[in-house]
Image (cartoon, grey):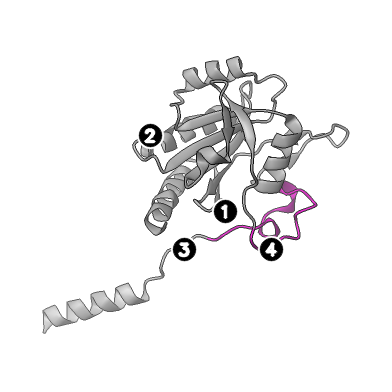
Amino acid sequence: MAVFTVICVTLFYVALKPKKTLPIFNPADVNPELVDSTVQYIQKYHTIADFSFTNQNGKTITQKDYEGKIYVADFFFTTCGSICPIMTTNMVDVQKAFLNNPKVMLLSHTVFPETDSVPILKKYAIKKGVIDPKWNLVTGDKKVIYTMARKSYLAVKLGKPTELYDMVHTENFVLVDMKRRVRGFYDGTKKEEIQRLIEDINWLLNEE
């Protein structure tokens, strides 16, 4: 009888326990400070746009390199002395967690492409322990990076109103699924948020 009771309680617990889910984020769901005004009204079917940038090895990186992948995107610059070093260290932890899983990649965009050239990105990558081709640090046209940051990833604030395409990166790590949908935002400066990110990536891997 006792065994039967334990089994019943366990079954009830499993049945009643909320099943983990991850939201699908659209521009209308996100802080409007981080979203370009032209897309703030979009409430569904938002996906990451096609892109083409140059990575730390001088290679052209496009959405094709991330096709069918789960990836984490962020925005930084190599001379940042505030949150960037912490974010990069934490992104290294994500890299370690999925080093042997080709379905998971990382993508970091510089917000200062005028100074973060390919050689500078390469030097930064070596210093920080970036592993090719798991993690791409990319540069490109500032307007294009700005557009991706605010229209696709929904993750970067406006900079000086007087300076065209000026942007201020945030601490956001953005989780993108295999269908190019935004599935989560994480504070890249906090270890507990990195753990949550790793758990959510594992959940997506099991769901895809």
Q: Is there a contact, CB below 8 Å, between mark 3 and mark 4?
A: no
Label whose residue precedes the other's in the sequence (3 or 4): 3
| Residue sitting at x 33%, y 76% | 15
User: Would residue 31 be counted in the magenta stretch?
Assistant: yes
| Residue of label 2 | 96
Q: Is there a contact, CB below 8 Å, between mark 2 and mark 4?
A: no
**Is the residue marked by circle 4 packed among few (<14), some (14-19), or many (20+) residues within 10 Å?**
few
| Residue sitting at x 71%, y 44% | 150
Please provide the residue range marked out in magenta.
Answer: 23-45
Give the numbered dot on residue 104.
none
| Residue of label 3 | 21
- Amino acid beneath label 2: Lys
Q: Position of residue 11 (x, y in %)?
A: 26, 77
Secondary element type, mark 2: helix
Gap between marks 2 and 4, in whole Å? 35 Å
Gap between marks 1 and 2, in whole Å? 23 Å
Gap between marks 3 and 4, in whole Å? 19 Å
**Is the residue marked by circle 2 packed among few (<14), some (14-19), or many (20+) residues within 10 Å?**
few
